[in-house]
Amino acid sequence: MSTTETNRLESRLGGITLEGRPHQLSAWAIVGLRLIMGWVMLTAGWGKIVGEFSAYGYLANVDPASPASGLFAVMAESGAMMAAVDVIVPVTQLLIGLALIAGVFVRLAALGAATQMVMFYFGSWDVAGGLVNDQLVYAAVFLALGAFAAGRILGLDRYIEQHPIVERYPALRYLLG
């Protein structure tokens, strides 16, 4: 293993500086986490695609105390919305899983996954058990994968970033990583 001191984390925000040196194996942990979360999303999406999936019961039965209960009720009452949700959820889960496993467009995939998890968090609202549940933890993990640019570590994003179109439009780097 390399003994160079290139691993360094530093961030300044609001007058506060955070610094640290991750362990040499941190990159492997990030790759492992990316692959595991990719597999979770891939299998969740695939299971819904090959099974009999409908989000109706989930959306129609959200706890009225949830901040999103009104939105989810409107969605459940609309046939067109239900048809869209019943396709969007499994297809995006499948695509997110594939993207994370391949390490391609990881930030975009992580943002999409975190958004889904936050929606699921509000859909499974239960403050009696505490404000933190598995969907919120998953959302945090997905955001961390994006923040750590997990697609640049044994992923295709590392190579895509070198493409001339990315050099021409550097804002595309926000989707990669």
Image (spheres, grey):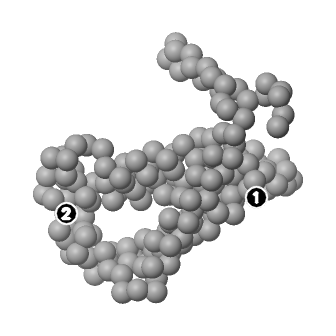
Q: Residue furthest top?
A: 15
* Numbered disc 2: secondary structure: loop
Query: What secondary structure is marked by label 1?
Result: loop
Instruction: Mark 1 and mark 2 in contact? Answer it, CB < 8 Å.
Output: no
**N-terminal of the two: label 1 or label 2?**
2
Position of 57 relative to 4 (above/below):
below
Q: Residue at horizontal 76%, vertical 58%?
A: 156
> What residue is at 70 percent from the left and 26 percent from the top?
8
> Where in the figure is residue 170, as x and y percent of width and height?
75, 44
Q: Which residue is mark 1?
A: 156
Where residue 101 sits: x, y (%)? 64, 63
Q: Nearer the viewer, residue 18 or 3?
A: 3
Determine which quarter of the picture holds residue 63: bottom left
- Vertically, is 126 above or below 12? below
Which residue is the site of mark 2? 62
Q: Residue furthest left?
A: 64
Residue type at mark 1: give it. Leu
Residue 56 lies, in percent from the top left, at: 26, 76
- Residue 74 visible, this angle: no
Who's the residue at 19% across and 47% down the image? 129
How much space separates mark 1 and mark 2, taking CA atoms? 39 Å
Q: Amino acid at mark 2?
A: Val
Image coords of residue 109 (percent x, y) = 57, 58
Q: 136 and 170: which one is in front?
A: 136
Instruction: Pick the residue in front: 78 or 157.
Output: 157
